[in-house]
Image (tube, rainbow, N blue to C red):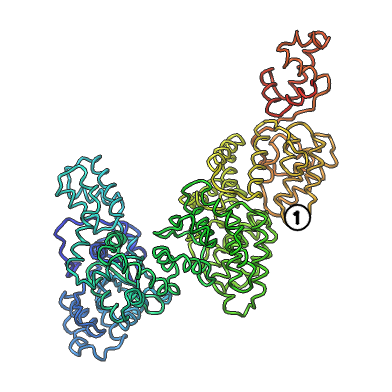
């Protein structure tokens, strides 16, 4: 028995799309929607899905039984109505022999379906034995709003029915959340349908079986790059390759596109040509926007768009019912390159200016692009800082801020600020935009705006805060966080403006600034009230806020709250990993650190690698580097971690200004790894530093009393009250210093408190501040200490030299031999040899060369030489 009816004939051998087919039929969906513009391969994919649906199953993923059938419903676009749609469906089913002549379907057809109910349609379809797939090609021409609603009701009532639709625009009712809740819906857009390099390679193999495999792979990669996987362009380039008989045929990118666009323009009236080029200036355009740009009525513009887009392009419908037309990227780029020739430079500039007004409320990003193209700098400045449109996302415009002349930035500090942010997100050179950012911070215009009340003040203060943060000006950035909070607190919470995306963005950017300044408790106070009103927040801002809260909690070591927030973040509908701005980066950092706490470096690295595509442009790179270094240490020990950290710091050197807190955080980690690698750290030139780095320096040099005093002082700081991670680290350093001084009482008390903190908060990473050998010694005082998580390294225990040992070391280094050194000191060679043995033992070395190296690295040699002067 035939299992497929009325499927279109394919004269060329089709390219198999198993990935699309299996994904479409997985778990037996009720609705399958293939959406995309012309040339995206919807019909070919639908044909293959239909054949696979009706074929015997060979995998467990495709659960359709062997008696399934697929029917391609042949419809006439000139007769659009719900009644006509169902008449054609039943007529095709009868013609295929799937419904008996005496069936309910026959009676419904004879009655014209004018009064047929949804229940009767569902009952008639249920008379088909087995599973049934109905394919509705080009549904955007045929399916009405009424048909969409009825179709959804029918598939909900008939469990054996699956409907596949191809369409150039969205089908609001079938794609709605309500539809997904009622039935299983599988949707594919044009990105899902693009051809991969491997599929293009297979297409070439089918078309040219004698082609050398190596050459075929190279040609496939070339075609993929030049077609961007768009099936229409990829197939055209394959044909061109065959016609050219050239090894480089696939590299002739653009010839098909140029011919396609030329034919499109030549077959169009002059006003349609203008509409085509004008609609290609931006990613998408509506009839209302195009009408304003071309100084036409909406009805006139709508007719032009319908004529312009009738061949190959699609549109989608937003929540207001507005159609937004869009060209494929390759076609849009070619049309845009011809715009000045067809429209004229002066008229094109007028279109840019009118586009600013037409798009500023519905597509502010396009309005900003139009202002740049028109060189309307005053308009651009106002658009950038408009509190209703203020956006610090990382979606780059095709016309970027970097193209704006320096003299314009100097006159307009708001433009300069956004140019700085754009340069950070899409770097092209060291310090070029950072210098501009530093200039604008002193600019009176932006400073004055930031002192205003209301939304204007919030927007200016937020922008100034971000620009100063990227410029490394921590004091001004923190000052602006206070200003932003002050102005926001003046806006009543019942004010509609308080619920805007821009206001929530101001809160989250303030939280980021505080995170980069190490003010975690302030972050928690700021963010917790926002998360508490999650139902009122926009989804993107809720995802961002949750990510930042998770990052803050995990970084401090409050793991129970942190893991709760991580779970909440990953359960949200907004994608994580990388999405438009910073959304997800903070969540991945938190999840990576949490995985390390649980002893899973592989999972930790997978979270970080999900950000790898944009890692160079993520402002949070110091925290990402910190966690990645811990992963490297987990796998390769302190030496491996130190090597990774040094390479990352060298790569980032001179790249962008970094906040002092982030710099110190990485320097502290480096000092710890140096010590864990057995190195003696040089003393600081300034003696006033009371921080963890100084503790590592003192311990590495055998100055255990100094280390104990510093660790004790730091562990009692009030700022560490809510930071169990850092407190546990300092308590362990305090315990290790006391152990080396044989102060058993202090060591025991410190270890007990550190162990209690780690058990209470499920922490393991603080143990890395002590070596495995030292941890075993400390565990003799408190057996519950989690020794297994301590450092794999063996920190050097340096004992301070006596005066005689120092003099002997100085003399041997300066004189070159023990005999000459002994003569200069009026001592016997055996006495000097004895002193040098003690020196080697205290420095943990075995030879004079090692002693010289260690003293050089630690600055001990300079101390010795100073005494001799």
Foreground residue among 529 and 383:
383
Residue 506 screen position, x and y as percent: 59, 66
Residue 240 screen position, x and y as percent: 18, 51
Does 779 sit left or right of 508 as displayed? right
> In the figure, residue 247 lies in which quadrant?
top left
Number of numbered callouts drawn: 1
Q: Is residue 106 above or below residue 412?
A: below
Foreground residue among 318 and 788:
318
Quadrant where the N terminus sits is bottom left
Residue 61 screen position, x and y as percent: 35, 59
Does 45 sit left or right of 514 as displayed? left
The answer to whether residue 436 is seen in the rendering is yes
Would you name the residue on which mark 1 appears?
719
For the point 70% across and 33% down, the residue is 681
Residue 700 screen position, x and y as percent: 73, 33
Does 560 sit left or right of 207 as displayed? right
Q: Is residue 170 above or below residue 728?
A: below
> In the figure, residue 691 lies in which quadrant?
top right
For the point 52% across and 60% down, the residue is 411
> In the figure, residue 176 lies in which quadrant?
bottom left
């Amino acid at each position: 028995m035939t299992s497929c009816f009325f499927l279109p004939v394919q004269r060329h051998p089709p390219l198999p799309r198993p990935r699309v087919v299996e994904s479409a039929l997985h778990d037996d969906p009720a609705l399958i929607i293939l959406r995309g513009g012309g040339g995206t391969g919807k019909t070919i994919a639908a044909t293959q899905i239909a054949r696979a649906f009706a074929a015997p199953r060979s995998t467990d993923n495709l659960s359709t039984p062997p008696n399934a059938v697929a029917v391609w419903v042949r419809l006439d676009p000139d007769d659009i109505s719900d009644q006509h749609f169902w008449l054609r469906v039943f007529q095709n089913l009868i013609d295929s022999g799937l419904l008996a002549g005496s069936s309910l379907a026959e009676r419904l057809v004879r009655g014209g379906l004018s009064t047929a109910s949804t229940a009767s349609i569902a009952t008639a379809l249920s008379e088909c034995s087995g599973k049934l797939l109905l394919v509705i090609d080009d549904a955007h021409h045929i399916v009405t709003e009424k048909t969409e609603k009825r179709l959804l009701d029918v598939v909900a009532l008939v469990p054996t029915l699956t409907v596949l639709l191809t369409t150039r625009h969205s089908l609001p009712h079938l794609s709605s959340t309500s539809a997904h809740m009622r039935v299983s819906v599988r949707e594919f857009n044009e990105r899902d349908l693009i051809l991969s390099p491997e599929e293009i390679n297979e297409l070439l193999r089918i078309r040219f079986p004698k082609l050398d495999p190596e050459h075929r792979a190279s040609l496939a990669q070339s075609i993929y790059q030049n077609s961007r996987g768009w099936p229409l362009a990829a197939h055209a380039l394959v044909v061109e390759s065959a016609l050219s008989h050239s090894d480089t045929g696939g590299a002739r990118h653009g010839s098909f596109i140029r011919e396609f666009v030329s034919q499109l323009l030549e077959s169009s009236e002059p006003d349609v040509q203008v509409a085509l080029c004008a609609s290609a200036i931006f990613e998408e355009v509506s009839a209302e926007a195009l009408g304003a740009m071309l100084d036409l009525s909406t009805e006139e513009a709508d007719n032009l768009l319908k004529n312009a887009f009738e061949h190959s392009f699609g549109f989608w419908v937003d929540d207001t019912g507005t159609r937004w037309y869009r060209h494929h990227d390759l076609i849009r780029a070619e049309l845009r390159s011809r715009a000045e020739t067809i429209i004229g430079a002066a008229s094109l500039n007028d279109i840019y200016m009118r586009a600013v007004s037409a798009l500023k409320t519905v597509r502010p990003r396009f309005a900003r692009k139009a202002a740049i193209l028109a060189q309307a700098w005053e308009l651009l400045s106002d658009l950038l800082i408009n509190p209703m449109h203020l956006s610090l996302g990382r979606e780059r415009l095709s016309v970027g801020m970097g193209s704006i002349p320096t003299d314009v930035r100097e006159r307009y500090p708001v433009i300069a600020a956004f140019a700085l942010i754009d340069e950070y997100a899409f770097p092209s050179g060291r310090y070029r935009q950072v210098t501009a950012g530093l200039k604008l911070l002193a600019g009176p215009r932006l400073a004055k705006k930031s002192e205003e009340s209301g939304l204007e003040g919030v927007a200016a203060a937020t922008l100034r805060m971000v620009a100063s943060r990227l410029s490394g000006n921590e004091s001004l950035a923190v000052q602006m966080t206070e200003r932003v909070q002050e102005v926001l607190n003046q806006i009543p919470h019942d004010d509609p403006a308080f619920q805007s995306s821009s206001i929530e963005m101001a809160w989250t950017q303030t939280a980021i600034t505080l995170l980069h300044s190490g003010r975690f408790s302030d972050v928690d106070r700021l963010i917790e009230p926002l998360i508490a009103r999650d139902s009122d927040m926009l989804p993107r801002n809720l995802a961002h806020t949750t990510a930042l809260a998770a990052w803050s909690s995990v970084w401090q070591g409050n793991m129970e709250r942190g893991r709760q927030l991580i779970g909440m973040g990953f359960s949200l509908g907004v994608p994580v990993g990388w999405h438009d701005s910073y959304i997800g980066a903070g969540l991945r950092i938190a999840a990576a650190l949490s995985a390390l706490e649980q002893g899973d470096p592989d999972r930790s690295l997978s979270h970080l690698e999900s950000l790898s595509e944009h890692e160079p442009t993520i402002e949070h790179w110091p925290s990402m580097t910190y966690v990645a270094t811990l992963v490297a240490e987990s796998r390769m020990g302190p030496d491996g971690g130190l090597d990774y950290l040094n390479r990352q710091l060298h790569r980032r050197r001179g790249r962008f200004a970094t906040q002092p807190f982030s710099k110190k955080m990485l320097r502290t980690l480096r000092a710890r790894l140096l010590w864990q690698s057995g190195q003696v750290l040089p003393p600081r030139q300034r003696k006033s530093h009371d921080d963890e780095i100084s503790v590592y320096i003192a311990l590495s040099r055998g100055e255990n009393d100094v280390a104990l005093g510093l660790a004790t002082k730091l562990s009692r700081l009030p700022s560490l009250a809510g930071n169990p991670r850092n407190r546990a680290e300092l308590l362990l350093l305090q315990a290790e210093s006391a152990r080396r001084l044989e102060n058993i009482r202090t060591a025991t008390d410190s270890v007990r408190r550190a162990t209690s903190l780690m058990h209470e908060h499920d922490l393991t990473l603080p143990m890395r501040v002590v070596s495995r050998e030292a941890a075993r010694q400390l565990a003799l005082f408190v057996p519950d200490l989690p020794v297994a998580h301590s450092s794999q390294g063996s920190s050097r225990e340096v004992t301070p030299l006596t005066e005689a040992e120092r003099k002997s070391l100085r003399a041997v280094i300066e004189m070159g031999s023990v005999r000459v050194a002994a003569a200069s000191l009026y001592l016997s060679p055996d006495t000097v040899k004895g002193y040098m043995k003690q020196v080697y033992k205290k420095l943990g070395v075995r030879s004079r060369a090692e002693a010289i190296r260690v003293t050089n690295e630690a600055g001990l040699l300079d101390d010795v030489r100073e005494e001799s002067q």
